[in-house]
Image (spheres, rainbow, N blue to C red):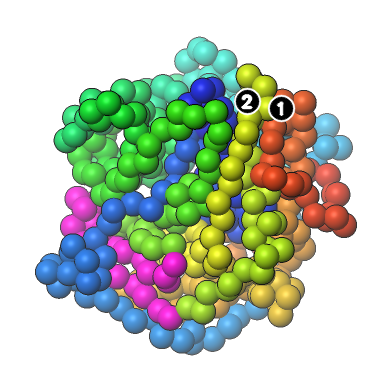
Amino acid sequence: MHLMGSFFYGLIFVGKLREMHCRANFMAKMFVVLTVFVLPLASVSPGGAGASQLVPTLDLGAATRTTIVEMREVWRIDADDERVLLGMVTDGFLTPDGSIYLLDSQLQRVIRVSPSGEDVVILCRAGEGPGELSNVYDIEPLGEGALGLISVVPPSIAVVDAVGVLTQTIRFELAPAKNGVGQYFSVVKCRPCGDGFIGVGEQTLVIGSSLVRRRFLAGFDGQGRESTRFDEHDRPVETSDIIHLSEWAMSFPPGDAWDVDVRHRVFSAIDRDRYAIQIRNSDGTPVAFLERPFDRHERTEAEREEAKSNFSVSSTGGRPQVKIEVDDFDPVILGLRCIENRLWVINSDWMSGIADHGASCFDVIDPDTGTWEVRCLSMPIDPRADMLIPLDSRRALRIRNLLGAFEGSTAGSGTVIGEGSSRIPGESEEGFAVILYEAVD
């Protein structure tokens, strides 16, 4: 998934930077542009509005096993690499031939790295011309070598071929709002799904005398027209001098906790406080729910204060007043991703995997049978500053010190980070780098 999305009054919000390790492609995929996304959406849930549809619920039960996968470094690109200058890489994916495509959201360009890491090519650069990047914070493989560059403003997908030549531009169109008068909107992240796309975004509407932001998860056809509204949720727009940030309201669900598999099924977390995942067809028809018991971690007062520093706000009009509300408990599901017919889920207990196994641990679920295992990738990681992007069952990208790169990019911009600091004393100060790891045979 999924860097910044504009707020009312020209504010910019970036949420949850501290918990990005593994929420990663999973999150920008949360480093994603957040044109302010990620709110609890109104979705069909067991015992709720959709209960009459008798959608089956698969009880995941206990994990069948825990597997520790030893990982080795294949290649890296860092500040000393003379082949390419890195700004801030926030996304990446693997192609069938083993090449890696990277999105540098700060410098607005796409970089292709060969399987061995020897060849590094810049395909697309920042600019306003055909095939050039502007406001792009998500990239997606579209098949047959094509690449989709998702722009927040205007909400669109630029389709380029394997050498970076623009072949098509698709503008997103929302269906008329059932209530209120729709104003501008954005799509911050999307996935190809059959002949169309599934995307998340936000629309500003006027309802009566009120201005609201409506977060949505929607399906679009191949021409970008909305065809299915999966979920939506409204929240009022700030109109006071004090900016109120709610952890619950700003960060869940589905946020980055959604994905589309090769069978065009849409998976999304449905509740911040439960381990519950909804499966729907591309037309929105409910298929099943995946659930299991989960012991939520209750935060200490110190952890609550630390959680406040996960939020960042900056303003071009001076230092804003910010009031932050955080929850007493950690969210359960932080992110999910479909990889090779399996659902990879990162939950709020991932720090214990690092403590117990020295590895980053995922719940790897077979969504058809409900069986699952814990898979731990044993590789160097700084859970407070790095981002981890699983590419397939054997390979993963480590975006080292992404937090430091973000802080460097906002230095001098008037950024307010929570009510404290976003960095923990003694935290790693390694330089920014992109490193590919693969499983040891």
**Disc 2 + disc 1, Cβ < 8 Å:** yes
Q: Residues within 10 Å of mark 1 (few under 14, many from 20)?
A: some
- The residue labelled by disc 1 is 414
Asked whether residue 337 is drawn in magenta, I would say no
**Residue 103 at least partly seen:** no
Q: Position of residue 46 (x, y in %)?
A: 25, 71
Asked whether residue 277 is drawn in magenta, I would say yes
Residue at (23% x, 28% y) in the render: 208
Residue at (63% x, 29% y) in the render: 320
**What type is the residue that disc 1 sits on?**
Gly
Per the picture, the main secondary structure of the magenta-coloured stretch is: strand
Query: Spatial distance from mark 2 to mark 1, Cα to Cα?
Result: 6 Å
In the foreground, 258 or 437: 258
Magenta-tinted stretch = 273-293
Q: Quadrant of residue 287?
A: bottom left
Tag count in the figure?
A: 2
Residue at (55% x, 65% y) in the render: 328
In the foreground, 226 or 233: 233
- The residue labelled by disc 2 is 315
Q: Position of residue 171 (x, y in %)?
A: 33, 24
**What type is the residue that disc 2 sits on?**
Ser
Q: Is residue 302 left or right of residue 334?
A: right
**Residue 412 at least partly seen:** yes
